Image: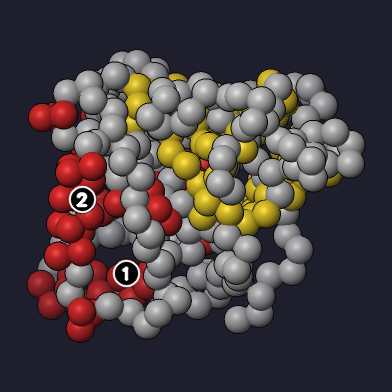
Amino acid sequence: MERLTAIAVCVLAVGFLSWAIFPPATAAQSPGAGAWTPWGDPDLQGVWVSIAAIGVPFERPEELGLRAVLTDEELAARNAAAAARVRPKLVPPAGWTRRRPSPPLASLIIDPPNGRLPPMTDDGARRAEVWRTKAAGDYAHAGPEDLRPYDRCISRGVLGSQFPNIYASAFQILQTPGQVVIHHEMVHETRVIPLDGRPHIAAGIRQWMGDSRGGWEGDTLVVETTNSNGRTGSYARNGNGNPTSEALRLVERFRLGDGGTLEYEVRIEDPLTWTRPWTVAFPLERDEDYDLYEYACHEANYAVPNILSGVRAAERRAGP
């Protein structure tokens, strides 16, 4: 596969979280010399990875209650447990996957304060059950539409693209005057985000990655995304968690932090799926040595034809 050339990718800045997760902004943490674009915006450009956050559970263990940060002992125990789960004979070659020490976050969810997903609505729970049923290995898929969009190499949605993943987890940010571009390595999706205050596209137009509009609040890039098509997932690897609806509204924040980090926060509002909004936050790391490669999933995707042909073969064996 050829290395991707200068492709875009965008940015968004982080808001105010707790001291333990993201320190509050200070003069020393604001972009310094060389951290501004020639036109005066904070320079968020580069390749960013979420590898360190892979070891952080999405939901907080109930026994931690309202504690958002682990003690040193708890963090060491979590890292040791993760290392113990690795089976040496099954470890892929170096470079296929990357792992780094995880931050002491108790969960990726920071709101609700208990770090757990809010209850689903009745309709959200119904759609989630259909989603899980069709994802089961013994489900008789009638056609490709029964498979999740990630399985079909179509899209992971914004949430699935931004949340931590064990491989191909990078995205590249490119900035121009009036626009920020975010290009994700996996499923090769790119968001071009205008910063000029233009309105969202018409409500009747629905897209896999929604419609994003951005702006600066001080040194934080804030991006609002609406117009989702309601066919992508939410949490879990690659957006394979419970499905969202067309009412989904995302507010992302990207802000440069200390030590080459980008603080990321996203507020998820979907009143047709959850009974209240919820928020995820975690740090991203700049990786100047990371090479983004072509993700040619669709061109080489034999999984869907094989799944469907296997179901048809099972039906023929079962007879009329």
Tell me the crowding category of disc 2: few under 14, some 14 to 19, or many 20 or more residues within 10 angstroms, Cα based.
some
Foreground residue among 81 and 4:
81
Rendered image quadrant of residue 25 = top right
Amino acid type of the residue that numbered disc 1 sits on in the rendered structure: Leu
> What residue is rendered at 79% in x and 41% in y?
33
The image quadrant where one finds the C terminus is: bottom left
> Which residue is outermost to the right?
39
Residue at mark 1: 308
In the rendered view, does 231 fall on the left or right side of 235? right
Q: How is the image coloured?
A: secondary structure
> What residue is rendered at 69% in x and 44% in y?
44
Foreground residue among 278 and 212:
278
Amino acid type of the residue that numbered disc 2 sits on in the rendered structure: Ala
Please tell me the numbered disc located at residue 76.
Answer: 2
In the rendered view, does 134 fall on the left or right side of 51? left
Element assignment for label 2: helix
The image quadrant where one finds the N terminus is: bottom right
Residue 157 seen by the camera:
no
Rendered image quadrant of residue 171 = bottom right
Rendered image quadrant of residue 121 = top left
Q: CA distance from mark 1 to mark 2?
A: 44 Å
Q: Position of residue 67 (x, y in %)?
A: 23, 25
Residue 185 seen by the camera:
yes
Mark 1 or mark 2, which has the lower sequence index? Answer: 2
